[in-house]
Image (cartoon, rainbow, N blue to C red):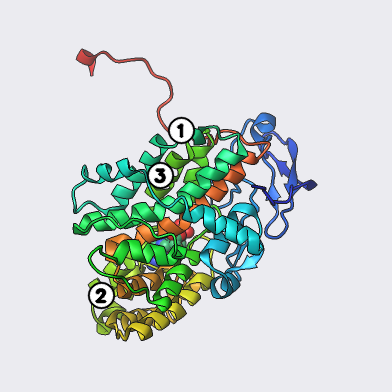
């Protein structure tokens, strides 16, 4: 697997002046292939004795990467140079996985081989089913995902030599193939139905629908429109550069930890409502609002600094424009509801909420637009997925992004353990006070 990221070369410098000492320092400026320039401050501490302060990494590029490019102001998202819209409309998830992992779209033979590899890794070790029995049936599916995906690390010792590209490749294939199987098992366990073994004659999305919704006692007919929608949802969630969960996987992996365990750490990070948990939170919010007449009340609440309520599915750290994924998701939503003949009042409510927010001064000024999660919950609900499984589907799709980033990171010649510094604000050294004197 190759890393196609262009090597950044220092071309220009910026000068930093310390007003206290009058000293000036020069730092190289790096140019990526597109996007903002980056100040290389790797020698900052050595030369100035100072750190930078950037909680939430709002201005920090933590790595070089050739996978995904986002222009948040223009609403652009590219994977290896291809626009998300083209990929979602013309490609399929298996091709996008190949693109992210290997750097390019596969030719016919590569596609066949790759698909074959993924298909033949979909079964999990028979022993894994026994883990599920240790969980309560009403456990949150993401809690079970963190545990069972993490447990994969106990099964594949051969992927521990992370310096061997072949072993890294097999680990990537295993993760892309087995996480959907585990996700479907999580669902089956929660409703008390038997686990369905994967089927090698089906596509990635079809197989996932089959493992989730089929039962052994009758044939399961796959609806091609729903399979296409599922595939598109996977494409739209496949990668999103250095988001919280991907950065978590990179940081965990930077200590050279087992990749299966690293991906489990990404799942934990994804769970939060500010990240992947937002799709679940959107549906809960729409149910809470309940009726179009209450939209103004909730818009008002979302703007109130003394109220913790936020419009879920709105706003993004990087996009200050319509999230390009949200547009495709909205169209897919119409397609699915039409196909299923569902007239969901929640869709009407969502559209009313979107209209009201986009016309509101607060949302305009703060550039808060619908993100990918705003419409995804409505589609997933229509397809029959329970709300608490939404973030699990996000994890199924994002696994390829996580493992591609991990693989890219391991190959970097300058790769070292991630170790941020801090602005210490606690007490300075003081003498120990014995218990009787406290
Ligand atoms: N509703 C109301 N106000 C908001 C919202 C919202 N959804 N999002 C941001 N704001 C306000 C926020 O209060 C702040 O106002 P002020 O400047 O007056 O303090 C300003 O906009 C900037 O927000 P921020 O929290 O500093 O921005 P951030 O970049 O740290 O957070 C975010 C980004 C996605 C966490 C946030 O917009 C949010 O919580 N959105 C709702 C949750 C959501 O939909 N998350 C899914 C993100 S996309 C999928 C994914 O990445 O997993």
Secondary structure category for the residue under label 3: helix
Report x, y in % for residue 73.
59, 68
Report x, y in % for residue 238.
50, 60
Total numbered labels: 3
Which comes sooner in the sequence, label 1 or label 3?
1
- Identified at 61% across, 45% down, the residue is 408
Q: Residues within 10 Å of mark 1 (few under 14, many from 20)?
A: few
Q: In this figure, which residue is indicated by the disc labeled 3?
A: 264
Indicate if the residue with disc 3 has its beta carbon within 8 Å of ligand 1. Answer: no
Is residue 214 something one can see in this rendering?
yes
Q: In this figure, which residue is indicated by the disc labeled 2?
A: 289
Q: Nearer the viewer, residue 14 or 401?
A: 401
Q: Residue 157, which numbered label? A: 1
Is residue 56 something one can see in this rendering?
no
Horizontal relation, residue 227 to residue 95: left or right: left
Which comes sooner in the sequence, label 3 or label 2?
3
Image quadrant, ligand 1: bottom left
Secondary structure category for the residue under label 2: helix
Image-quadrant location for residue 391:
bottom left
Position above or below: 309 against 349: above
Position above or below: 297 against 311: below
Between disc 2 and disc 1, the foreground one is 1
Which comes sooner in the sequence, label 2 or label 1?
1
Marks 3 and 2 sit apart, C-alpha to C-alpha, by 34 Å
Indicate if the residue with disc 2 has its beta carbon within 8 Å of ligand 1. Answer: no
């Amino acid at each position: 697997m190759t890393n196609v990221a262009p090597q950044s070369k220092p071309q220009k410098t910026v000068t930093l002046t310390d007003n206290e000492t009058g000293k000036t320092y020069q730092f190289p400026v790096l140019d990526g292939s597109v996007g903002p320039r980056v100040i290389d401050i790797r020698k900052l501490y050595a030369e100035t004795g100072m750190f930078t302060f950037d909680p939430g990494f709002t201005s920090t590029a933590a790595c070089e990467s050739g996978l995904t490019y986002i222009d948040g102001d223009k609403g652009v998202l590219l994977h290896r140079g291809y626009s998300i819209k083209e990929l979602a409309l013309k490609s399929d998830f298996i091709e996008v996985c190949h693109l992210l992992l290997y750097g390019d779209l596969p030719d016919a033979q590569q596609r066949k081989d790759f698909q074959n590899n993924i298909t033949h890794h979909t079964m999990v070790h028979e022993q894994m089913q026994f883990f599920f029995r240790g969980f309560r049936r009403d456990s949150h599916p993401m809690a079970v995902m963190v545990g069972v995906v993490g447990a994969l690390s106990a099964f594949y010792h051969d992927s521990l030599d992370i310096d061997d590209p072949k072993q890294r490749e097999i680990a990537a294939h295993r993760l892309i193939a087995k996480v959907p199987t585990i996700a479907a098992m999580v669902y089956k366990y929660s409703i008390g139905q038997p686990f369905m073994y994967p089927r090698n004659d089906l596509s990635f999305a079809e197989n996932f629908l089959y493992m989730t919704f089929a039962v052994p006692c009758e044939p399961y007919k796959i609806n091609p429109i729903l399979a296409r929608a599922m595939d598109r949802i996977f494409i739209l969630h496949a990668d999103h550069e250095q988001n919280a969960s991907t950065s978590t996987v990179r940081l965990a992996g930077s200590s050279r930890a087992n990749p299966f365990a690293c991906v489990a750490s990404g799942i934990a990070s994804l769970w939060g409502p500010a990240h992947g948990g937002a799709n679940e939170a959107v549906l809960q919010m729409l149910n809470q609002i309940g009726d179009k007449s209450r939209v103004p009340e909730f818009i008002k609440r979302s703007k109130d600094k003394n109220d913790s309520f936020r419009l879920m599915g709105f706003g993004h750290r990087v996009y200050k424009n319509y999230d390009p994924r949200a547009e495709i998701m909205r169209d897919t939503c119409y397609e699915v509801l039409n196909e299923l003949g569902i007239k969901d009042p929640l869709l009407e409510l969502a559209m009313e909420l979107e209209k009201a927010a986009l016309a509101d001064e607060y949302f305009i000024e703060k550039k808060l637009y619908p993100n990918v999660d705003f419409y995804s919950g409505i589609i997933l609900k229509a397809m029959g997925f329970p709300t608490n499984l939404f973030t699990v589907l996000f994890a199924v799709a994002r696994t390829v992004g996580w493992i591609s980033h991990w693989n890219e990171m391991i190959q970097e010649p300058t790769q070292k353990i991630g170790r941020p510094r801090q602005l210490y604000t606690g007490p300075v050294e003081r003498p120990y006070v014995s218990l009787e004197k406290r």
